[in-house]
Amino acid sequence: MKIRNTLAAFLLLSAGVTYACMPGQNFDVYFSSGSAAVSSSEILRLANWLVDQRIKYPTQEVLQVDGRAEDHERNARALAKARLQAVVSILKTQHFNQVPVDEHYGVYRSDDVGNGRRVEISILPACPNPCCSDGDMPTKR
């Protein structure tokens, strides 16, 4: 019984460590209904996030960008692609594409999410980042 309790305690404590390290960084750029134009407030939010990411993680391993629209928006699939292209253009203009951009786009059903009118940006920083072990070397691209 004592061994079982010790094992259970160990598993609980080690599970916390497993979830403590998540190097991926995510950011959503939101759009008005039916529009692929990035508003000035969203450009400012994105610019601030990009600066923070450059400071914290100067190199990238993966950069994925997903353009989204809601199914009730006119020409939703084309709109999702246009949103994707608008944000990728900003990322490239700001030279935030050290690695090739993995681009996807699609349509959310209206009841799937609270706001499907967005572009989702996900980056995986290269080492060094908080999840790299001491032996990991920075990835050169």
Image: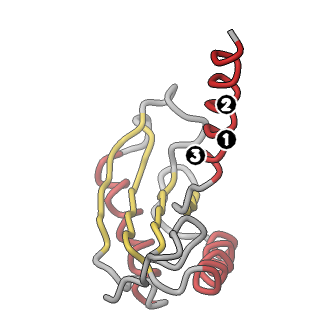
Q: Label 3: how many residues lie within 10 Å, few (<14), some (14-19) or many (20+)?
A: few
- Residue 62 marker: none
Q: Is residue 136 left or right of residue 54?
A: left
Is the residue 36 above or below the residue 89 in the image? above
Residue 104 location (% of width, % of height)? 30, 56
Can residue 75 be seen here? The reply is no
CB-based contact (under 8 Å), mark 3 and mark 1: yes
How far is the residue under mark 3 from the one under mark 1?
A: 5 Å
Residue plotted at (46% across, 67% down): 123
Q: Amino acid at mark 1?
A: Gly
- Amino acid bearing label 3: Thr
- Tell me the crowding category of disc 2: few under 14, some 14 to 19, or many 20 or more residues within 10 angstroms, Cα based: few
User: Which is nearer the N-term, disc 2 or disc 3?
Assistant: 2
- Image quadrant holding the N terminus, namely top right
User: Could you say which disc has been placed on residue 16 in the image?
Assistant: 1
Residue 72 pos. (x, y %): 43, 35
Label disc, if present, on residue 12 of the rendered structure: 2
- The local secondary structure at tag 3 comes to helix
Left or right side of 1 for 33: left
The percent coordinates of residue 109 (x first, y second) are 42, 30
Q: Secondary structure at mark 2?
A: helix
Q: Residue at x 61, y 30 (%)?
A: 11
Q: Residue at x 39, y 80 (%)?
A: 89
Q: Is the residue under label 3 in contact with that under label 2 (CB below 8 Å)?
A: no
Q: Are marks 2 and 1 in contact (CB under 8 Å)?
A: yes
Which residue position is annotated with label 3? 18
The quarter of the image holding the C terminus is: bottom left
Residue at point 46%, 84% (across, down):
59
Q: Is residue 10 left or right of residue 85?
A: right
